[in-house]
Image: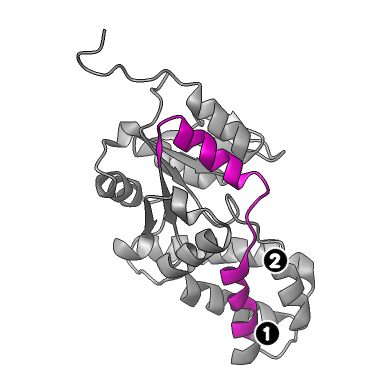
């Protein structure tokens, strides 16, 4: 049993903020809304492949390239206007309904909160501010700082170092198994937000599982607190 984390890092896209409004933007440029899941999976695939071969590109560049490919493949004009319209939606994603409650549970339980994103730091701050969450977040850490994408080990270690804690005292909350696996392999405590999706047996198991963000936050708070040196 791992100890209660001093710092909790939240993955941002999909975990804290929903991608659902992007379906309407995809439809507005001539695609079907159900291509959203394929597109986002392709963005991750290409980013991971680039990183594995020693190449770093920021989120927007990879997302734009995959979207252009998707548009052309569906016989839809791949003009810059269409691409910009869809990508602009990332700055307007809504938080999941229990995000505020989950953040408050952790803060009230004594854990600090940071954001850890494969996306852009400025966009992430904007999302958190629009959702009223920024005041609960100590730091926004983007992979842009280290020029590697999660789930590279270096990203999680950088996040822990930036928060000035040992990796074992940081937790990651994420709805992506690959993110949980990467954080666990780097020595972090992990909390998987399942939302009805089973965790794959091929990856390192999470330390705790919650159906929702709030469930995951409560599960982390149920971990044993670390004794304060000198306390009775």
Pick whichever, 11 or 61, lies toward us.
11
Q: Which residues, given as a range, are shown in magenta?
A: 83-112
Pinpoint residue 99: horizontal percent, then vertical percent: 60, 46
Q: What residue is rendered at 63% in x and 73% in y?
A: 89
Compared across the picture, whether 142 is left or right of 13 comes to: left
What is the secondary structure assignment of the residue under circle 1?
helix
- Looking at the image, residue 74 sits to the left or right of residue 191; the answer is right
Image coordinates of residue 147 in percent, x first then y, are 32, 64
- Mark 2 crowdedness (10 Å alpha carbons): few <14, some 14-19, many ≥20: many
Q: Say if residue 201 shows up in the picture.
A: no
Q: Quadrant of residue 186?
A: top left
Using the rendered view, name the quadrant where residue 43 is placed: bottom right
Magenta span includes 54: no
Q: Residue at x 65, y 43 (%)?
A: 98
Q: Residue furthest left?
A: 230
Which residue is depicted at the point 58% across and 75% down? Answer: 66
Pointers 2 and 1 in contact (C-beta within 8 Å): no
Can residue 32 be seen here? The reply is yes
Task: Based on the picture, tell me whether residue 108 belongs to the magenta stretch.
Answer: yes
How many tags in the picture? 2
- Give SS at disc 2: helix
Mark 2 highlights which residue? 36
Q: Which residue is mark 1?
A: 72
Residue drawn 65% across the image and 38% down it? 212
Which corner quadrant of the image does residue 53 belong to? bottom left
Q: Quadrant of the C terminus?
A: top left
CA distance separating discs 2 and 1: 15 Å
How would you rate the neighbour count of disc 1 (Cα within 10 Å): few for under 14, some for 14-19, many for 20 or more? few
Predominant SS of the magenta segment: helix
């Amino acid at each position: 049993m791992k100890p209660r984390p001093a710092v909790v890092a939240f993955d941002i896209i999909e975990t804290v903020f929903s991608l659902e409004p992007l379906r309407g933007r995809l439809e507005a440029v001539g695609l079907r809304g159900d291509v959203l899941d394929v597109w986002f999976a392709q963005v991750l695939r290409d980013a991971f492949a680039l990183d594995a071969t020693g190449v770093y590109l920021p989120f927007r560049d990879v997302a734009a390239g995959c979207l252009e490919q998707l548009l052309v493949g569906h016989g839809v004009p791949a003009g810059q206007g269409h691409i910009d319209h869809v990508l602009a939606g990332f700055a307007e994603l809504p938080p999941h309904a229990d995000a505020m409650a989950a953040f408050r549970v952790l803060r009230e339980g004594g854990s600090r909160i940071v954001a850890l994103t494969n996306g852009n730091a400025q966009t992430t701050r904007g999302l958190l501010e629009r959702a009223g969450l920024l005041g609960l977040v100590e730091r926004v850490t983007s992979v842009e700082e280290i020029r590697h994408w999660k789930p590279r080990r270096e990203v999680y270690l950088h996040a822990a170092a930036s928060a000035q804690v040992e990796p074992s005292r940081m937790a990651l909350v994420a709805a992506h198994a690959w993110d949980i696996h990467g954080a666990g392999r780097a020595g972090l405590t992990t909390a998987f937000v399942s939302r009805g999706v089973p965790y794959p047996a091929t990856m390192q198991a999470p330390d705790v599982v919650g159906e929702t963000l709030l469930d995951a936050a409560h599960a982390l708070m149920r971990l044993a607190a670390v004794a304060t040196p000198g306390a009775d």
